Image (cartoon, grey):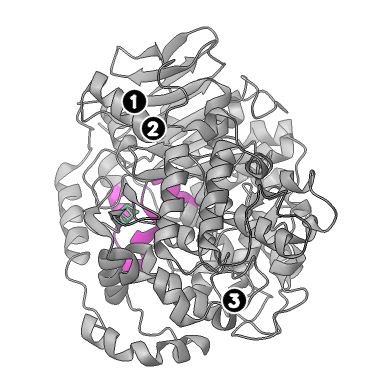
Amino acid sequence: MNDFTGKILEVDLTDKKIKEKNLDKELYKDFLGGLGLGARYVYNNQVENVDPLDPRNTLGFVPGLLNGINLPLSGRLSVVGKSPLTGTFGDANVGGFFGSELKKAGFDGVFIRGKAEEPVYLNIRENESEIHEADELWRGSTKETIETIRKERGKNTRVASIGPSGEQESLISSIIFDGYRAAARSGLGAVMGSKNLKAISVKGNKEVNIANENKLKEIREEMVDGLSKKPSRVTGIIRKLIQPILPWLLRRGVTGYFDEGTLLDMFKEYGTSMTTSISTEMGDAPCKNWKGVGSRDFPYKEASKISDENVTKYQDRDYACATCVVGCGGIVSVGEPPFEVEEVKKPEYETLAAFGSMTLNNDVESIIKCNEICDLYGLDTISTGSVVAFAIECFEKGILSKEDAGGIELNWGNKEAIVELTKMIAKRKGLGDLLADGVKEATKEIDDGANECAMHIRGQEIPMHDPRLNPSFGNAYVTDPTPARHTKGGAGFNEMGATPNPFKEIELLEINRNEYEGKGNAHAISVKIQLLLDSLGICLFLGYFGKFPLLEAINAVTGWKRSKESLLETGERIQAIRQSFNIREGIHSYDFSLPKRVKGNPPLDAGLTEGITIDLDTMRKDFYQSMSWKEDGTPSEDKLIELGLRDVAEEL
Ligand code: SF4
């Protein structure tokens, strides 16, 4: 008796075939589920050097190992495949209910290849999955698609859908789940579009097996208890009292009052929107397309307009992913013109920063509007906001003219222009068509000078955490097999002071934000933990709120007797297989680099990060050594064999 079903669905859209396949049980021990299982499957089954938009690219939807049981914050799923945006291994992690539902339908994953002749959607049910025509859904928004499928299949059906952006193979397109959560990074919406696959729906009613239900019940109670009664150092009233001096404290890097209880309270109240003003003031949120200083160019007073209560005042109701007792999400609306929005998920911090501090836009209603456009058309908000900031800088420098911009005055902070350009990107209209494939592709068509404004790593726009403040984020952005990913930020989170390590059984290593040497081991442990979370389906935020007996939970659910060492080795194995995928494609992460501006070259001239140029090479070398990777980022043969990846060692 164990949590995994041992079964996946393999779908070939070209041949219109659906096959159930049993997996070797050892695979789960080695790779768990979610990202790990997905990465191993893609490595084994993908044709080498295939174009990501070729029908032979494999796209996987893989629930975390702990999806489908009632453990708090354990409902996340990974989407995997070769990224059309970066050409590397690509993945995107998403909350919501889809992963748990897939488990309840009896599957540990669904892997899709081929291309349908006409638009289709895949409907998954135990023993009766089918490929269904979707002509009438094509060109529809994600919302229309989800509503129509639910009318056909039942209102509790879970639906993952692309919008027109994915259909048109926009390289920054996302996949929207049930309308309220997004698998946004890596451009995997375009892979769905390239397969003529509009959506996947799933409904299941199987119970997930648990080896030791009593033990799991105990752990569940401990977790629920820990997530509801955490003492908070700073209550709501004290928070309000320190507000006037908060910018002063933040500019000096003082964040000590954010203990676990305070974070938990604030997450429940505001979600990630709580951090926008704080991050901008400290220099965590990039400002003015990475060349501004938050505390000067988008100061606390302005950033507050797109932060915490100025966002939640639009909230109509709360939203929580499956099994979550925190519920950081919300559903918002805007009633007044010019940016009316009927209903959309509350913008996350990343969205608020990308369309806010990055573009110097302090108008929260316009950001909610951009968020709605991105969700309806299926676009990644980090990339889309970054592309808009890029276009504004090009316009301000005269690289793009008003005529190029379709008559829009693309100035910093021009909220109408920002919304209009976002619509153009979504519709691939005019300049928007050029921008819909991200900044790297756009520079190929724009005059000289645009390159200098294009902030990306191997094509993927950079997340909203500035390495000049927390340098290990920079290390993560260039060493992860999927470049520019903050959720694999490793020791960047340690430096931030809010480390997402929810494992009671695993200790992190202390590091100093301002030193570059000797951080390799600390970074490696944090990265492994983040990979484990993505493979278990646990929300990264759980670690903000405390430590929980997750190793015991895994053993209770599966009946295994895992140690913390074997778990960390699993994290290392997952990173090795992702990295090996890239190496086999001829891609070496040593070639990934941060744009000079993001590295601090030249450094900023004010703020907490004034004068800082980060030493990326030292951190990268240290990390490679800690992972037993060679100087070019290739895992050593000995290490691969030690991790049980002899087949990979022989192939590379
Ligand atoms: S904390 Fe937020 S993102 Fe995480 S599981 Fe809960 S609702 Fe979802």
Out of 499 and 310, give the one closest to the viewer: 310
At label 3, counting other C-alpha atoms closer than 10 Å, the crowd grade (few under 14, some 14-19, many 20 or more) is many
Residue 631 shows which numbered tag? none
Residue 469 shows which numbered tag? 3
Describe residue 275's horizontal placement relative to residue 413 as left or right: left
Question: Which amino acid, by three-letter code, is at mark 3?
Answer: Leu
Describe residue 206's horizontal placement relative to residue 290 as left or right: left
Q: Earlier in the sequence, mark 1 or mark 3?
A: 1
- Where is residue 410 shown, x and y percent of the image? 63, 59
- The image quarter in which residue 66 lies: top left
For ligand 1, tell me if the residue under mark 3 lies within 8 Å: no
Which quarter of the rendering shows the C terminus? top right
Image height check: is 372 above or below 269?
above
- The image quarter in which residue 603 lies: bottom right
614 drawn magenta: no
- Where is residue 110 shown, x and y percent of the image? 43, 25
At label 2, counting other C-alpha atoms closer than 10 Å, the crowd grade (few under 14, some 14-19, many 20 or more) is many
Q: Earlier in the sequence, mark 2 or mark 1?
A: 2
| Magenta region, residue range | 531-553
Image height check: is 286 above or below 94?
below
SS class, disc 2: strand
Image height check: is 7 above or below 577?
above
SS class, disc 3: loop
Which corner quadrant of the figure contains ligand 1?
Answer: bottom left
For ligand 1, tell me if the residue under mark 2 lies within 8 Å: no
At label 1, counting other C-alpha atoms closer than 10 Å, the crowd grade (few under 14, some 14-19, many 20 or more) is many
Instruction: Tell me if residue 29 can be seen.
Output: no
Q: Are marks 2 and 1 in contact (CB under 8 Å)?
A: yes
The residue wearing badge 2 is: 160
Question: Which amino acid, by three-letter code, is at mark 2?
Answer: Ala
Magenta stretch, main secondary structure class: helix
